[in-house]
Amino acid sequence: MLLSISLNSAYQKVLLFDSFTEGGVLRASALYTAPSGKGINAARALKTLKSNVLITGFIGGANAALILKELKEENIASDFVLTATNTRTCTTLINKKNKSFTELIEPSGKISPQEVKVLKKKLSKLFKKTKLVTISGTLPPGVPGNFYNWIIKEATKYGVRVLADICKAPMKEALSAKPYLIKMNHEEFSATFGSQNTENQIYRLFKKGISWIIVTDGKEKFLAGTNGKVFLVTPPKIKVVNGVGSGDTMLAGLAYGINKGLSPEETLKIAVGAGAASALTIRPAEFELALMKKLVRQVRVKRL
């Protein structure tokens, strides 16, 4: 089983507009909804990749009922800790005229110390039957800053590899626990480690015991490193419909390839192809396998 941890879940709304300008009355032409947050998005993508995945973390309030209902409809297994505070709603505005999208994110509710304690106990049990864990996103208020560090250390006790899509302070806290993989975009990478040469920093991270390092750059070429090797990855050229969830889908593709024991090149191609396929759909982290396979063939991976 693969485990996706969603500490800062969301209920996602996507509103489509033929066009809009700020300051007026905006009437949407369509509405789409989905359980979301980076961990849930990764779980959805892993399910599409036909992986046995379970999602856990925090959800609460009226949105928790919607999330559980819709995850069940998607046949995505879950085992959440229910919180007293309501799960946030995030809203994506897509302007079809100029192909832009805007993300509105509500503040997260505060998690209580008791709720953190309950999740810790749950995770310790789940790690006993888990092969690989993904962690991603920001920490909601009330969750200790070293919580990701604890997750990695606890999972490692059971021989479970942890893939971390986090950055800045949470990443700095987590790094000493040696996650198996770290992933962030170029801006996040610079904010976390400084603006020094990315390739040199990847080699420094190898020396710290990190097996995989991914530094994406949107639709541009990016660097990825594993097993002491660094690769230049060129994504396929696409016209993005909704980029929300694309990075989470890429994390799922990495988890899939690593869990299957695929080569670094194969793993990177699947991850990038899946992320690109997700960006071509309206709902976050939703994609068709046939389209993904087509895009995988367009990904280029070159060892430096």
Image (cartoon, helix red, strand yellow):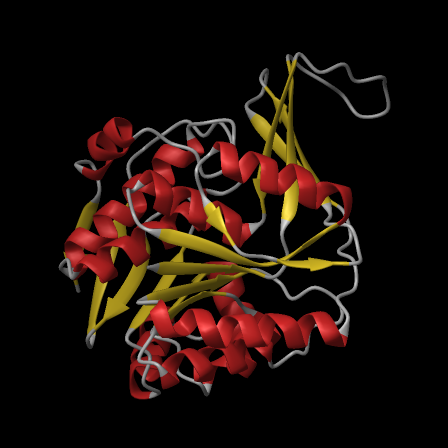
**Depicted 184 relative to depicted 212: above or below:** above
| Number of marks in picture | 0
Q: Position of residue 130 (x, y in %)?
A: 35, 67
Q: Position of residue 297 (x, y in %)?
A: 16, 36
Residue 273 in sight here: yes
Left or right of residue 290: residue 129: right
Residue 104 in sight here: no
Quarter of the image for residue 208 reads bottom left
Left or right of residue 18: residue 173: left
* Residue at x-position 66% and y-position 12%: 29
**Depicted 99 relative to depicted 264: above or below:** above
State which quarter of the image contains the C terminus: bottom left
Left or right of residue 111: residue 118: left
* Residue at x-position 33% and y-position 75%: 160
Quarter of the image for residue 119 reads bottom right
Q: Position of residue 63 (x, y in %)?
A: 72, 42
State which quarter of the image contains the N terminus: bottom left
**Depicted 125 relative to depicted 283: above or below:** below
Q: In terms of depth relative to the viewer, which is nearer, 10 or 201?
A: 10
Quarter of the image for residue 289 reads top left
**Depicted 178 relative to depicted 93: above or below:** below
Q: Position of residue 164 (x, y in %)?
A: 44, 67
Q: In terms of depth relative to the viewer, which is nearer, 83 or 43?
A: 83
* Residue at x-position 16% and y-position 55%: 265
Q: In terms of depth relative to the viewer, which is nearer, 79 or 4?
A: 79
* Residue at x-position 38% and y-position 52%: 53
